């Protein structure tokens, strides 16, 4: 089943560029949220986000939910 994925920059001491799934708690606290698209997995969302933001990573909370 596909889901909606977002790119966001986490605010704080170290600004992390992350890919989040819809409904992530961390997404509400992040700044600069942008919709990436609808994908079948978080990994596919990350691949799409890295086309524009090569340094982005997967949100650890979202990764734990998809296991």
Image (cartoon, rainbow, N blue to C red):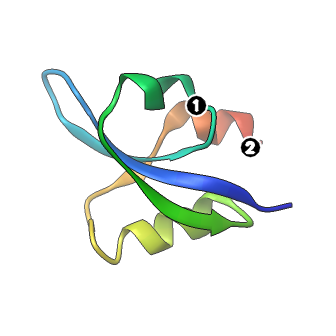
Residue hosting label 2: 66
Q: Which mark is residue 15?
A: none
Q: Label 2 neighbourhood size at 10 Å, few (<14), some (14-19), many (20+)?
A: few
Circle 2 — which element? Answer: loop
Placement of 30 over or under 40, stated as above or below: above
Residue at the image position 70 percent from the left and 61 percent from the top: 41
Helix, strand or loop at mark 1: loop
Tell me the number on the disc at residue 24.
1
Residue 65 image point, x, y percent: 72, 34
Q: Quadrant of residue 13?
A: top left
| Real-space Cα separation, disc 2 to disc 1, in angstroms | 12 Å
Q: Earlier in the sequence, mark 2 or mark 1?
A: 1
Q: Write the residue at 56% across / 66% down.
A: 37
Quarter of the rendering occupied by the C terminus? top right
Q: Residue at x 46, y 32 (%)?
A: 27
Crowd tier of the residue under label 1, counting other residues whose Cα lies within 10 Å: few below 14, some 14–19, many 20 or above: some
Dividing the picture into quarters, in which one does residue 2 lie? bottom right
Frontmost of labels 2 and 1 is 1
Position in image of residue 50 (x %, y %): 36, 70
């Amino acid at each position: 089943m596909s889901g909606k994925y977002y790119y966001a920059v986490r605010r704080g001491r170290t600004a992390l560029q992350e890919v989040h799934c819809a409904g992530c708690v961390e997404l509400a606290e992040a700044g600069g949220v942008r919709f990436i698209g609808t994908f079948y997995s978080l990994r596919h969302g990350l691949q799409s986000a890295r086309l524009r933001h090569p340094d982005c990573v997967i949100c650890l909370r979202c990764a734990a939910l998809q296991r």
